[in-house]
Amino acid sequence: MKRFVITGANGHMGKVIASVIANREDCTVLAGIDLNDKQNEEFPVYKSFSELKEKPDCVIDFSHPSALDAMLAYCTENNVPVVIGSTGYTPEQKAQITAVSEKIPVFFTFNMSLGVNLLAALAKQAVKVLGGQFDIEILEKHHNQKIDAPSGTALMLADAVNEAAGGQYEYIYDRHSVRQKRGKKELGISSIRGGTIVGEHDIIFAGRDEVITLSHQAASKEVFAVGAVNAAVFLSDKPAGMYDMSGMIG
């Protein structure tokens, strides 16, 4: 039985993750970490890692970039694997995560959904087939409470496309300030925020007289929670290194 700590335990995603774990027989929640340390009947919730009384098999993080330093410090000092599902990290924080993976197992991806990761793989294949003949745009939609834009998933998909294209694309996030024709080496990324949209991502390949669209829609946040829990079970006995969804499903 694997025992996990959830950071952001009293947030929406933290509660969904706890619900997913409660319905499994191979893992359980040891404790939660949250500045809002409202207690529940299932497990204790602490304000900080310093209050943890037992060592978990893995930490699952769906909190906030501001919590990164304390979480990585605890995991490194105690040799605890960590699954990072939060988004909005700065380039410096991403470098910090990469550096820590040399000491402990780290599972880091901008989207825990199996479907989204398949979408990224399909986009890579499409780039190889279509070459430079099609303009590529990414459109992402999320609920009106999401803070960061574009989404981490949109950037992950853009990076997948750009990797397959040999890094030739420049990311264009907003066109309103520039009055000119679209460049051939542009990769447009657009964001929509509204209502309770869980997450929708379209990769649009626009060519001469034809358009190909690869799409993914999440109906609930449970798809991300299931992926995160699967990642924690997968990671809990792995050696130090950086892991992602492709390594888990490959």
Image: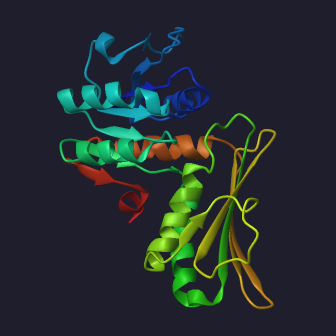
Q: Nearer the viewer, residue 23 or 232?
A: 232
Number of disc labels: 0
Q: Is residue 239 above or below residue 129?
A: above
Q: Nearer the viewer, residue 5 or 97?
A: 97
Q: Is residue 237 visible?
A: no
Q: Nearer the viewer, residue 150 or 202?
A: 150
Residue 217: percent from the left, percent from the top?
A: 70, 56
Q: Residue visible at 49% across and 31% down?
A: 64
Q: Is residue 177 visible?
A: yes
Q: Locate the N terminus by quadrant.
A: top left
Q: Residue visible at 48% across and 78% down?
A: 168
Q: Is residue 180 above or below residue 150?
A: below
**Is 101 displayed left or right of 93 in the figure?**
left
By what rule are the colours in the image chosen? rainbow
Q: Residue visible at 55% across and 63% down?
A: 157
Residue 215: percent from the left, percent from the top?
A: 69, 66
Kindly indicate the quadrant of the structure image that contains residue 233.
top left
Residue 80: percent from the left, percent from the top?
A: 25, 33
Q: Locate the C terminus by quadrant.
A: bottom left
Residue 37: percent from the left, percent from the top?
A: 50, 10
**Is 47 displayed left or right of 178 in the figure?**
left
